Image: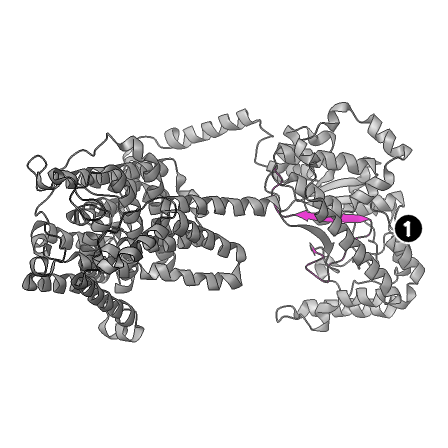
């Protein structure tokens, strides 16, 4: 059926083709109706808006207190004990006072608890975000000591700032870090308001894994000075950062502080044993149920040992020294240097969102609920903005804490509320007891916490056997982060991901299509051995949209598969060809320049050679051509590819195979030779995978139609969707591709082409084979819904609405099928 008739009969709902301006006005009207007229100010709409922004109002009254409260409380206490030492440690990694890590573990969580749609994400400090924020603090804040630990600005270290407990240097670091948190929150809030949540899908798992794995090496490296206690280890940023740091580290490794190194080594060994061999052992966890908070034990025993042994004075071990007690007073972030941090904070916002949303989707899928990425963007953005008024650096979801929360049995964000009470107790009262804690213990906590992220490098072995493209993305992002820097590596990863998408679309799969004998199903002839071509018809499928980047490549492939290059060479110079070219209007030759680009000439030549090789191999088969074609038809029936659910189809194919085998000798070699020389009269492009075309793509179709017409070949388009047809109308392609050349299904286009060729009497060889097999019918073999009538000649003229199809061997078998007379309009 023609597409135009199908739309008329079945009532297409979409409007007539609209210009871009008309479509823009239509979308604006729809948006206005949805947002204004469809949302009148009522109590119900206000409540809906409020619950959309603050989901806790909706789910808290429905909270299952009996079944969920106890698991949430246990998980909250566990995460609270885990988050406290991690917060202090990651604050040190961010180059800010240790107490700010406790603030990040408290204030943003209050907002996220109310606005989040994820039930399992644990917001707070994170290794990757901390190491990225440390670059901003290092570039813009004041420091009393240089890279070697020498005091260069004693006034920054000794003088308190405005009577507070912080020195000038410490307050400068807090101002810069809180300003970075504010900007990150603004970016994420904007992402949520404009509905950019869908863009997260472009951050593939391999990109996120490669990035976090490379960033974990940066986090691990940042703690070398704390764990080894070396002096003279400089801070390096920019390209080749890790290479320079390790070169510098091995130069000064002889200055390792032995006591500090011993404290750090003991802490690392204890953490690895507990986290990997106890908490990571399923048998042990099935007994103890709750994972052991190894970080908490390191903090407790490290603090006791440092206090009892007086490690700072007697052994020279660096300790935290000072953790202010009480709530910080709210203050505005430092706005003066925000303009210089826009780029860096954008990178942090994107990375934080990609990690958080990936984790959220993972655990939402595992527990059978859904999250709203746009609302998550808003929740994290508002949480960061709120936290920036309370000395908080950028926060993010933690992979380790989220996994622990899930393993312990946490079910809702009540876990975050319980966790906040633990951190609050430390901020208000217990923080002063952490002042003797050695920095080596904190460095060990950070190092061990990123080991699992570093072990993701083993994914390369798995990806090697699954997908080289995904492995390439992982490896390139990882190497970009390692060799260059975190932000530059992220840019490389995003560019790589976009490039792979572009390359896949720029060179899509284009291949020949054939018919599965006995059915109206069409498949790739180079994929399915039983799919056979139809005499006189070339069918090519394009598995991608046709647009400016791939139009020239698709043109080259379609022309090669349809053998149009040889046909054009054959017809060029003939009077008929020149006459058709002269009669074409001048404006009809104005196509997009892309369609005149020669793309990889060697590829087209190799394809033509390959097609000639296939033809020669068929001719060399000689008398075996009948048998080989029958064997192609009967592969499934022969049992080599039989499956349990196709018993009925096997019986059908067996009947068809035996029918043709019994009459194969009746077809002489001359008839087969004639069938090989049947000229191509129709080119059908299967557009079932073409979701859209642009102006350049329409230009390709115009040129293809004109060149096909010049060599007496008719172009047909099958399975075109309405956006494609609308674009053809807007570009005035109906001068080249008439409405009767657009078909709803591929089978309709084939039947139309066969009927046109039969009326013209062009396929005499195919008709000869058809006449010899006229007495052979597949009525008994075909399914009831596809049985074929061969009584066309016996039917009265008024009933002659169908005829038998051509039955042929060698190129393949064409099942007897009814042919609707779609060409009546062209008489």
Q: Position of residue 483 (x, y in %)?
A: 41, 50
Q: What secondary structure is the magenta-colored segment mainly?
A: loop
Q: Secondary structure at mark 1?
A: helix
**Pick the front one: 261 or 338:** 261
**Nearer to the camera, 398 or 791:** 398
- Position of 765 with respect to 113 (left or right) is right
Q: Position of residue 445 (x, y in %)?
A: 23, 59
Residue 759 picture location, percent across and down: 87, 44
Whether residue 821 appears in this view of the structure is no
Q: Which residue was labeled with disc 1?
A: 764
Q: How many numbered tags mark residues here? A: 1
Residue positioned 9% across, 63% down in the render: 304
Mark 1 neighbour density, 10 Å: few (under 14) some (14–19) many (20 or more):
some
- For this view, does 750 lie left or right of residue 578? left
Rendering quarter of residue 166: top left
| Location of residue 211 in the rendering, given as x and y in whole percent from the top left corner | 39, 51
Q: Quadrant of residue 798?
A: top right
Q: Which residues are magenta?
A: 524-547
Quadrant for the C terminus in the image? top right
Residue 177 visible in the picture? yes
Seen in the picture, residue 64 relative to 104 is either above or below; the reply is below
Left or right of residue 167: residue 794: right
Instruction: Depth check: give the residue in front, 260 or 795.
Output: 260
Residue at 70 percent across and 68 percent down: it is 636
What's the residue at 36%, 38% (across, down)?
191
- Colour convention of the picture: one colour
In the rendered image, residue 540 lying in the magenta stretch gets the answer yes
Is residue 598 located in the magenta-colored stretch of the structure?
Answer: no
483 relative position to 136: left or right: right
Quadrant of the drawing holding the N terminus: top right
Q: Is residue 698 above or below residue 262?
A: above
Q: Quadrant of residue 653?
A: bottom right
């Amino acid at each position: 059926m023609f597409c135009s008739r199908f739309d008329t009969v079945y009532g297409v709902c979409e409007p007539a083709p609209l210009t871009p301006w008309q479509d823009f006005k239509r979308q604006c009207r729809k948006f206005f109706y949805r947002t204004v007229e469809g949302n009148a100010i009522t109590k119900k709409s206000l409540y809906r808006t409020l619950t959309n922004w603050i989901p806790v109002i909706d789910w808290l009254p429905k909270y299952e207190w009996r079944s969920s409260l106890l698991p949430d409380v246990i998980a909250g206490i566990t995460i609270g004990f885990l988050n406290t030492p991690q917060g202090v440690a990651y604050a040190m990694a961010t180059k800010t006072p240790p107490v700010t890590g406790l603030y990040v573990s408290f204030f943003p969580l209050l907002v996220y608890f109310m606005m989040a749609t994820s039930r399992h994400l644990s917001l707070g400090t994170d290794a990757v975000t901390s190491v990225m924020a440390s670059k901003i603090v290092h570039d813009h804040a004041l420091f009393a000591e240089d890279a070697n630990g020498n005091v260069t600005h004693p006034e920054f270290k000794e003088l308190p700032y405005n009577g507070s407990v912080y020195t000038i240097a410490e307050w400068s670091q807090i101002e810069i870090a809180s300003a970075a948190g504010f900007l990150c929150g603004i970016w994420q809030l904007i992402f949520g308001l404009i509905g950019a949540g869908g863009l997260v899908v472009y951050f593939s798992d391999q990109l996120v894994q490669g990035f976090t794995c490379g960033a974990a090496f940066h986090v691990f490296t940042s703690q070398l000075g704390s764990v080894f206690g070396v002096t003279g280890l400089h801070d390096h940023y920019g390209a080749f950062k890790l290479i320079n740091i390790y070169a510098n580290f091995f130069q000064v490794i002889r200055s390792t502080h032995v006591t500090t190194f011993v404290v750090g080594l003991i802490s690392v060994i204890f953490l690895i044993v507990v986290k990997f061999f106890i908490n990571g052992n399923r048998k042990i966890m099935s007994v103890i149920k709750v994972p052991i908070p190894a970080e908490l034990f390191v903090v407790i025993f490290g603090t006791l040992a440092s206090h009892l042994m007086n490690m700072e004075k007697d052994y020279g071990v660096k300790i935290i020294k000072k953790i202010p007690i009480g709530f910080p007073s709210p203050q505005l972030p430092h706005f003066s240097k925000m303009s210089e941090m826009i780029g860096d904070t954008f990178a942090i916002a994107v990375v934080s969102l990609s990690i958080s949303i990936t984790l959220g989707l993972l655990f939402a899928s595992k527990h059978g609920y859904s999250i709203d990425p746009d609302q998550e963007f808003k929740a994290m953005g508002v949480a960061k903005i709120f936290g920036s008024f309370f000395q908080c650096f950028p926060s993010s979801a933690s992979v380790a804490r989220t996994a622990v929360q899930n393993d312990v049995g946490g079910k809702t964000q009540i876990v975050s509320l319980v966790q906040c009470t633990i951190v609050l107790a430390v901020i208000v009262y217990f923080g002063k007891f952490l002042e003797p804690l050695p920095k080596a213990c904190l460095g060990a906590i950070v190092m061990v916490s990123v080991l699992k992220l570093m072990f993701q490098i083993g994914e390369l072995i798995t990806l090697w056997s699954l997908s080289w493209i995904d492995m390439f993305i992982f490896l390139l992002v990882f190497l970009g982060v390692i060799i260059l820097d975190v932000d530059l590596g992220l840019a490389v990863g995003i560019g790589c991901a976009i490039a792979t998408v572009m390359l896949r679309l720029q060179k899509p799969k284009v291949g020949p299509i054939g018919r599965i004998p006995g059915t109206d199903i069409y498949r790739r002839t180079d994929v399915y051995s039983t799919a056979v071509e139809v005499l006189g018809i070339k069918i090519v499928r394009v598995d991608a949209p046709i647009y400016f980047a791939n139009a020239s490549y698709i043109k080259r492939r379609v022309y090669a598969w349809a053998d149009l290059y040889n046909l054009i060479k054959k017809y060029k110079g003939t009077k008929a060809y020149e006459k058709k070219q002269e009669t074409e209007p001048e404006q009809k030759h104005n196509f997009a320049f892309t369609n005149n680009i020669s793309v990889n000439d060697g590829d087209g030549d190799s394809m033509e050679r390959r097609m000639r090789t296939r033809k020669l191999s068929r001719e060399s088969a000689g008398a075996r051509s009948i048998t080989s074609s029958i064997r192609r038809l009967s592969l499934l029936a022969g049992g080599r590819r039989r499956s349990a659910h196709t018993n009925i189809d096997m019986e059908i194919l067996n009947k068809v195979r035996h029918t043709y085998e019994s009459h194969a000798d009746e077809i002489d070699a001359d008839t087969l030779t004639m069938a090989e020389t049947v000229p191509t009269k129709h080119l059908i492009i299967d557009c079932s995978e073409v979701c859209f075309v642009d102006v350049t793509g329409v230009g390709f179709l115009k040129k293809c139609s004109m060149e096909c017409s010049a060599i007496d070949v008719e172009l047909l388009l099958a399975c075109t969707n309405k956006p494609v047809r609308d674009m053809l109308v807007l570009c005035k392609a109906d001068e080249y591709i008439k409405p009767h050349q657009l078909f709803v299904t591929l089978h309709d286009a084939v039947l139309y082409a066969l009927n046109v060729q039969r009326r013209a009497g062009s396929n005499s060889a195919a008709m000869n084979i058809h006449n010899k097999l006229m007495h052979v019918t597949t009525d008994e073999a075909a399914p009831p819904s596809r049985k074929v009538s061969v009584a066309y000649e016996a039917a009265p003229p008024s009933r002659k609405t169908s005829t038998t199809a051509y039955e042929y061997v060698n190129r393949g078998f064409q099942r007897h099928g009814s042919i609707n007379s779609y060409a009546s309009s062209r008489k």
